Amino acid sequence: MRDIDVFCVFPSVVDGALRVGVVGRAIERGVVGYRSFDLKEFAPGGRIDDMPFGGGAGMVVRVDVVGRALEAVYGVPAREVRKERRVVLTEAWGRAIDQAYVNEVAEGPDVTIICGRYGGVDERVRALLATEAVSLGPFVLSGGEIAAAALADAAIRRLDGVVGNRESLIGESYSQRGLVGPPVYTRPAEWGGMPVPGALLSGDHAKIRSWREEQARLRASQGEL
């Protein structure tokens, strides 16, 4: 992945999350391309939703609006976009985003994220335009912008040239299956009556490594994720 686009109702939400820190600097330097698009700009009268067929509460994002947006940006029929790009739809029922999926995204083709909103997205977006649907977990958000920002941030930071010290990605939480990071400490050596564990102050690298591995295993077994 070298390019990521987000189509949503509130681009400022995604922009605000991605244009800071190491990810923001990577975008500024051109390490990765990032664009956001307001779906309302591709909708008749600025309205992207309508009442669901069959009745029911909530409004539904229209497939024709999403299709028009994809065609305007990529210059090909909407159905063909997913032939060249990973087209991700954010939905509460989608595949839960985990580190394995993030790595898959970072190592794959360029990405387009379509954000759900309101009472849902017309199923034809998933069936005809998207390659997959993803979620942050089994709960409902007001919209997919937060999920889009989380996925984009997690994937972008895996790219070469984004994180200054590449070694910091090795051994961090989820860099390997079932691995979480151990507790970390810095100055002062004691605070609130709680000292830094002696192993970290010993200067014995083997002892430090052993302590960190043990604590990481303990943390994972206790479910402190």
Image: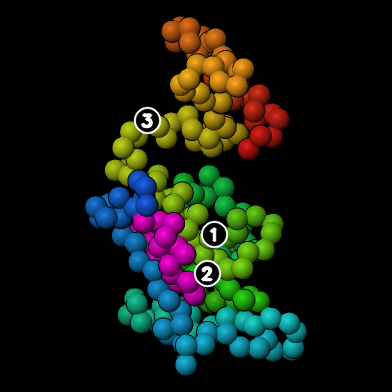
Residue reaching furthest bottom?
A: 45
Looking at the image, is 67 positioned above or below residue 187? below
Per the image, label 1 sits on a secondary structure element best described as helix
Looking at the image, is 13 positioned above or below residue 200? below
Q: Which mark is residue 167?
A: 3
Question: For the residues marked 3 and 1, what is the alpha-carbon distance in whole angstroms?
Answer: 27 Å
Residue at the (35%, 46%) spot, across then down: 22
**Dividing the image into 4 quarters, which one contains the C terminus?**
top right
Residue reaching furthest front?
A: 192
Residue at the (52%, 87%) spot, across then down: 47
Residue interval drawn in magenta: 2-19
Q: Which mark is residue 147?
A: 1
Residue 76 falls in which quadrant of the image?
bottom left
In front: label 3 or label 1: 1
Query: At label 2, which amino acid type do we have?
Result: Cys
Asked if one can make out residue 109 in the rendered structure from this viewpoint, the answer is no
Q: Which mark is residue 221?
A: none
* Magenta stretch holds residue 152: no
Left or right of residue 218: residue 148: left
Residue at the (56%, 20%) spot, across then down: 191
Per the image, label 2 sits on a secondary structure element best described as strand
Q: Position of residue 78 (x, y in %)?
A: 43, 79
**Which residue lies under the disc numbered 2?**
115
Query: At label 3, which amino acid type do we have?
Result: Glu
Is there CB contact under 8 Å for labels 2 and 1?
yes
Q: Earlier in the sequence, mark 3 or mark 1?
A: 1
Left or right of residue 108: residue 138: right
Is there CB contact under 8 Å for labels 2 and 3?
no
